[in-house]
Amino acid sequence: MTTNDQHYINLIINGDTNAFAVLVDRYKDLVYTLTLRMLKNREEAEEVSQDTFIKIYKSINRFKGDSKFSTWIYRIAYNTSLDRLKKNRKHLNNVAIDEFTEHQVKTIDNALSQLETEERNQAIQKCIAQLPSDDAFLLTLYYFEDQSLDELSKVVGLTPNNVKVKLFRSRKKLATIMKAQLEPEIIEHYGGERN
């Protein structure tokens, strides 16, 4: 995939504007999902997605290939969303966090892993959508794009260790929401398992 992306990047740099449509097509759904996680508003997410691709197009010759192209795109989507949030100065409600232990977070993960993939995805998506912007963005990449800590740290501009801490806190918030929303019997049924 990455070498394939590089092929299109080279075409775009050499003036082939049609090649950009291929990359837009490849990443537009995820960029939209990520901007929606940050902005919590469909129209704004659409605008910011478009802005993201405009920025990508204008600065594609600066992509050096020192990270995955997708990581670079997610970083631009993240920063563009942050800019919009600052502009709007919207303060989103923070989820109250119970003091979840690491075991309790694992319990939620265990319960999720028992669900059918589609059910699991829907359950996570629904609960992630209620998180504050940063958390929602990070967990979308963590659960649905299998981004490594290194990749995530490049996207949000933090050290891998800070990302680890942030990710753990985000998962605690998610656990709080899921505990309240998921069928309690799912948690009870699978919750006893220990890894």
Image (spheres, grey):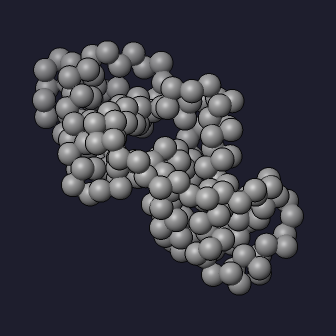
Q: Is residue 109 visible?
A: no
The image quadrant of residue 61 is top left
Q: Position of residue 180 (x, y in %)?
A: 62, 74
Count how many numbered circles sit on residues in the image: 0
Q: Position of residue 102 (x, y in %)?
A: 79, 53
Residue at the spot 66% in from the left edge and 47% down from the top edge:
169
Q: Residue at x 13, y 29 (%)?
A: 17
Measured as percent of width and height from the top left, residue 31 is found at 34, 45
Please tell me which residue lies in front, 150 or 108. 108
Between residue 194 and residue 17, name the one nearer to us.
194
Q: Quadrant of the C terminus?
A: bottom right
Q: Quadrant of residue 105?
A: bottom right
- Residue at image location 28% in from the left, 42% down from the top: 88
- What residue is shown at x 62% (from left), y 35% (from top)? 163
Relative to 48, 138 lies left or right: right
Q: Along the horizontal axis of the image, is 59 left or right of 180?
A: left
Report whether 25 appears left or right of 2: left
| Residue, far bottom | 185
Indicate the quadrant containing the N terminus: top left, top right, bottom left or bottom right. top left
Q: Nearer the viewer, residue 163 or 85?
A: 85
Instruction: For residue 38, say whether it is visible.
Output: yes
Of residues 179 and 10, the one nearer the viewer is 179
Examine the rendered structure and indicate whether residue 4 appears above or below residue 67. below
Establish if 92 lies above or below 184.
above
90 with respect to 154 (left or right): left
Task: Estimate the x, y position of residue 187 in percent, counting from the top left.
Answer: 72, 76
